[in-house]
Amino acid sequence: MPEVVPGPAELRGRLLAIRRSGRSIGLVPTMGALHAGHRALLEAARRQNDTVVASIFVNPLQFNRKEDLETYPRTMSEDLKVCDDCGVDLVFAPTEADLYPVEQLTFVESAALSQHLCGQFRPGHFRGVATVVLKLFNIVQPDRAYFGQKDAQQLAIIRRMVQDLNVPVTIVPIPTVREPDGLAISSRNQLLTLDQRAVAPVLSRALRKAIDVIQNGEQRVAVIREQALAVITPCAQTRVEYFEVVDPELLTPVEQVDGPVLVAAAMWLGPVRLIDNISWPD
Amino acid sequence: MPEVVPGPAELRGRLLAIRRSGRSIGLVPTMGALHAGHRALLEAARRQNDTVVASIFVNPLQFNRKEDLETYPRTMSEDLKVCDDCGVDLVFAPTEADLYPVEQLTFVESAALSQHLCGQFRPGHFRGVATVVLKLFNIVQPDRAYFGQKDAQQLAIIRRMVQDLNVPVTIVPIPTVREPDGLAISSRNQLLTLDQRAVAPVLSRALRKAIDVIQNGEQRVAVIREQALAVITPCAQTRVEYFEVVDPELLTPVEQVDGPVLVAAAMWLGPVRLIDNISWPD
């Protein structure tokens, strides 16, 4: 089993000797409830670094709804097995008091990148994400940090934060891991009923449809959206929160596809909110 | 003369070998126009570190008025002599394009600490300060960084930023350097006419008066303020922007002195804005 280090000071102490000896450090920040998507991050980190640190911390700052925070799955003993499996060296599992010993008064924010896609429906979420990720970067001081492309807006915001604030870390994006039927793997998938689970892949099919339409030469986003949404509309219990074609870095909606784009969507399936996205071109 | 390094990448390269050899690095961030106040910072950094880096960068992000930015004094050759004098090893003098190669979309902000004192009169100023200081910390990765107590709100915001974001740096506060008549040294003092210069020490005398009143047992801030302001009121061309007694960490105004406080003020003298502060107890 990997060693579990709770406090920031202890972790820094452990990593100091590693860094001084010139060995590289890879960080995989997680909120636990580890699944195949996280495994892909951990395995990439294992391949590319001498030392792998996984953090497990359910960050209250990024939950805009209290009940979401309270019901978020906590599966530490299973998570440690996954970390062990993937060759993680150190697991950083701080308490809330470890990371927020006093009221947090300083925040990192990209208002420009947070106003689109998920950000418009989750006020304060990405401010909480950027702030805790920068804290983790400052505690671990990794050479590389790993983030899934499934959370495309999070990835874009963290990449821009690293660039804008000159953070000395390389961000490594890892492709979305999917079930055989195309559904992007997420801890929320377990909340679906059997019926909902059967419908869920429609989200990735609609994104795929949008990409096919673009691939066939259609540039008008209104047309692309209409054809993609037609894939979802007939399905019971679905409600599309957004389905957007945006600039892959700035996340601003485009009306005409004349360069690389990100096609991203959020869909409610009964009480469960699913997100997914595909970049074009690959 | 110290070596001048313009680009962040070059500076990082130069500092990598120093850090790897275990030698300590002290950073003094400045906007140039160096005076005796900066000398005190540089000398402290020289005493406490193996390598001293001074940065000289007039940061557009922290100017809320364009004409302020344009008229800010730029005296690079004199500044380099001061750095040489004080034993600075490396001067980091980036251009605006070096530090902001793309539009800055990510900011560091403490809204809670920015709403008091100077912050309420300079919207966006401390967001610009915190953001550029964090960039400099990330580029230089110093062991220690030096800030003057004269800019008390800046110091409080940076200290809290370092704590809240787990930035691996020790902030060293340096006492305000004063002229023999008590006037806090500032590059703005040079903008005063002879008449105004004769009046200027009234600001530090008023602060001193507030401290004396506190020292004599008065706890009511309304009374303390009244007696301190009476020192300034008779003086020609003065206009007090604020004169506050606040919590030294949170900067919130207090009504009753029953613990440590910061007494801070800003005063216009004709067209020149002066600031000063004293902590109680020392």
Image: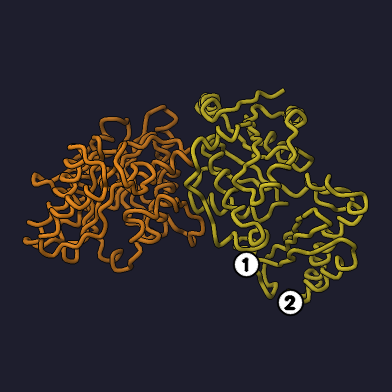
Chain colours: A orange, B yellow
Q: Nearer the viewer, residue A97 or A274?
A: A274
Q: Tell me the residue at 33%/61% (across/down).
A: A121
**In this view, A173 is above or below B165:** above
**Left or right: where B223 falls relative to B61:** right
Give the residue at mark 1: B252
Total of numbered circles in the picture? 2
Q: Which mark is residue B220?
A: 2
Whole-angstrom CA distance, mark 1 to mark 2, is: 15 Å
Q: Position of residue B168 (x, y in %)?
A: 51, 43
Q: Tell me the residue at 31%/40% (across/down).
A: A146
Q: Quadrant of the C terminus of chain A?
A: top left
Circles 1 and 2: CB atoms closer than 8 Å: no
Q: Nearer the viewer, residue A194 or B206?
A: A194
Q: Quadrant of the N terminus of chain A?
A: top left
Q: Position of residue B17 (x, y in %)?
A: 52, 24
**Left or right: where A241 falls relative to B145:** left
- The image quadrant that residue B123 belongs to is bottom right
Mark closer to the observer (1, 2): 1
Q: Earlier in the sequence, mark 1 or mark 2?
A: 2
Local crowd at mark 2 within 10 Å, few (<14), some, or many (≥20)? some
The amino acid marked with disc number 2 is: Arg
Q: Nearer the viewer, residue A81 or B228?
A: B228
